[in-house]
């Protein structure tokens, strides 16, 4: 009896996950709390639980996430979700629907970034990419703008964890005027709305 109940629960969970993914659209933005070593630093700097993001695209009817990790790659949606803390995540969508032409431009740009190294210094160049930079620039390729770039100096850099990370990555040469955009900057954009949140 217990085995039957457990099997039923597993089937229901898998069905629910499948239904949820089918509600998502090409170009949706997905956020979670990463388990990576730098996640805590990002959370402290931005005063947010959101430390990683990517863009959902479908291929052959299956959902994937373009993301900037090491290296920039495509990850099956459920695998991406499972990597987050507690399987919690948020999906946002631009308020004005994307056209097919915009989606094509965005997809082509995202594909062109595959294989690039992750940018540990969060610099605004195209040589390397960090997660929210990739998301932002993918949308720019589709002539859409989500979130506003800020400077390093606009964020909270005073926590000891953050200071240690900065010293390790930059030494004494951090450019506080460097443009940067974080997952929470995109999440808070007036151009997007939340369509799913299980936090």
Image (cartoon, rainbow, N blue to C red):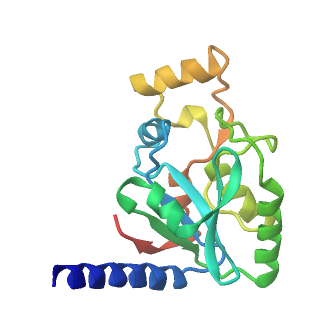
State the image coordinates of residue 24 (x, y, percent, origin top left): 55, 80
- Identify the residue at image location x=80%, y=62%: 111
In the image, what residue occupies the spot 55% across and 68% down?
77
Foreground pick, 178 / 15? 15
Quadrant where the image shows the N terminus: bottom left
197 over 188 or under it: above or below: below
Name the residue at 77% across, 54% down: 114
Q: Nearer the viewer, residue 3 or 51?
A: 3
Place of residue 73 in the rendered image (x, y in percent of width and height, measured from the top left): 69, 55
Percent from the top left, x then y, of residue 121?
65, 32
Q: Quadrant of residue 138?
A: bottom right
State whether residue 149 is above or below residue 11.
above
Residue 131: horizontal and vertical position, in percent? Answer: 62, 50
Count of labels in the image? 0
Residue 142 in sight from this viewpoint: no
The C terminus, quarter of image: bottom left
Q: Residue at x 63, y 28 (%)?
A: 176
Q: Quadrant of residue 3?
A: bottom left
Q: Residue furthest top?
A: 172
Q: Is residue 58 above or below residue 115?
A: below
> Which residue occupies the foreground of this view, 157 or 77?
77
């Amino acid at each position: 009896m217990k085995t039957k109940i457990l099997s039923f629960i597993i089937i229901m969970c898998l069905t629910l996950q499948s239904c949820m993914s089918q509600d998502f659209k090409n170009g949706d933005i997905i956020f979670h709390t990463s388990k990576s070593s730098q996640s805590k630093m990002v959370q402290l700097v931005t005063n947010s639980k959101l430390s990683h993001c990517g863009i959902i695209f479908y291929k052959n009817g299956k959902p994937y996430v373009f993301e900037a990790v090491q290296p920039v790659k495509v990850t099956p949606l459920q695998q991406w979700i499972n990597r987050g803390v507690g399987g919690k995540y948020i999906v946002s969508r631009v308020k004005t629907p994307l056209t097919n032409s915009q989606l094509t431009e965005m997809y082509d740009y995202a594909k062109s970034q595959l294989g690039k190294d992750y940018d540990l210094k969060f610099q605004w160049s195209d040589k390397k990419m960090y997660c929210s930079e990739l998301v932002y620039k993918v949308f720019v390729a589709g002539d859409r703008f989500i979130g506003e770039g800020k400077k390093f100096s606009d964020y909270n850099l005073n926590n000891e964890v953050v200071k240690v990370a900065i010293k390790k990555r930059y030494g004494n040469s951090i450019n506080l005027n460097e443009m940067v955009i974080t997952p929470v900057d995109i999440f808070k954009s007036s151009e997007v709305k939340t369509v799913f949140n299980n936090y």
